[in-house]
Amino acid sequence: MSGIIGLSPNMKSGVLGKYPDGHVIQVCSNSDDTTVTNTGASEVVCACFCDITIKSSTSTLMILASCEFYQDSTPWVVHYNIKQKSGAGHDIDPAAYTQIKPFSRAAGQDGDEGFYTVPLQVHWTHGQSVGATHNIAVTQTIASSGTVHNNNSSAFSVMSIYEVEGTVTG
């Protein structure tokens, strides 16, 4: 953001404790190479997660997840979710998390084994209090038969969270 403090109408220089709209307040990121295997229709929490402590109650979180997956040669379709839970730390129990954004039928293949990167992104207007810590994670459910491995064979997944002041659209 550019402008002259005190002269630019978007800088909000006279408002103590208020970040200008569109200002990136903080960036949190995490990468993990733990292998998580899903062989059925149950939901699993992937090794693609990040903690964030809210710095502004009027901010939006821009969540970018890049998940690495390997699937066997059985045809499959996978649903992904970006979910959150209160408090720091990754939890392997999907029931600990609540939905932010579902991605139905986000990936699939017809019978060839291979490695895939699944990029997911969402803007979350959280409405949480300053100081509240949340763990954001990706979950997956196989909608058909097959085996899907998150981070198999030395691959890793990355999540980055940008806390941006104001409402982000698009």
Image: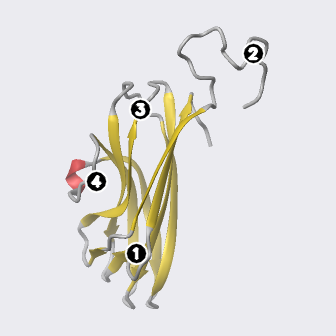
> Within 10 Å of the Cα at label 1, are there few (<14), some (14-19), or many (20+) other Cα atoms?
some
Q: Label 3 belongs to which residue?
A: 54
Q: Quadrant of residue 52?
A: top left
Select label 1 or label 2 by which is in front. Answer: 2
Q: In this picture, is 74 found above or below 125? A: below
> Within 10 Å of the Cα at label 2, are there few (<14), some (14-19), or many (20+) other Cα atoms?
few
Q: In 3D space, how far apart are the residues under numbered discs 1 and 2 (Cα atoms)?
A: 49 Å
Q: In 3D space, how far apart are the residues under numbered discs 3 and 1 (Cα atoms)?
A: 35 Å
Q: In this picture, is 96 found above or below 68? A: above
Select label 1 or label 4 by which is in front. Answer: 4
Q: Label 4 belongs to which residue?
A: 90
Q: Are marks 1 and 2 in contact (CB under 8 Å)?
A: no
Of the pair 142 and 154, the residue shown nearer to us: 154
Q: Which kind of residue does numbered mark 1 sit on? A: Val
Q: In 3D space, how far apart are the residues under numbered discs 2 and 3 (Cα atoms)?
A: 26 Å
Q: In 3D space, how far apart are the residues under numbered discs 4 and 2 (Cα atoms)?
A: 41 Å
Location of residue 168 in the rendering, given as x and y in whole percent from the top left corner: 59, 36
User: At x 66% / y 13%, what residue is drawn?
Assistant: 13
Closer to the chain start, of discs 3 and 1, is 3
Closer to the chain start, of discs 2 and 3, is 2
> Within 10 Å of the Cα at label 3, are there few (<14), some (14-19), or many (20+) other Cα atoms?
many
SS at circle 1 = strand
Q: Label 2 belongs to which residue?
A: 9
Q: Are marks 1 and 4 in contact (CB under 8 Å)?
A: no
Q: Label 1 belongs to which residue?
A: 77
Location of residue 85 in the rendering, given as x and y in whole percent from the top left corner: 29, 44
Q: In 3D space, how far apart are the residues under numbered discs 1 and 4 (Cα atoms)?
A: 25 Å
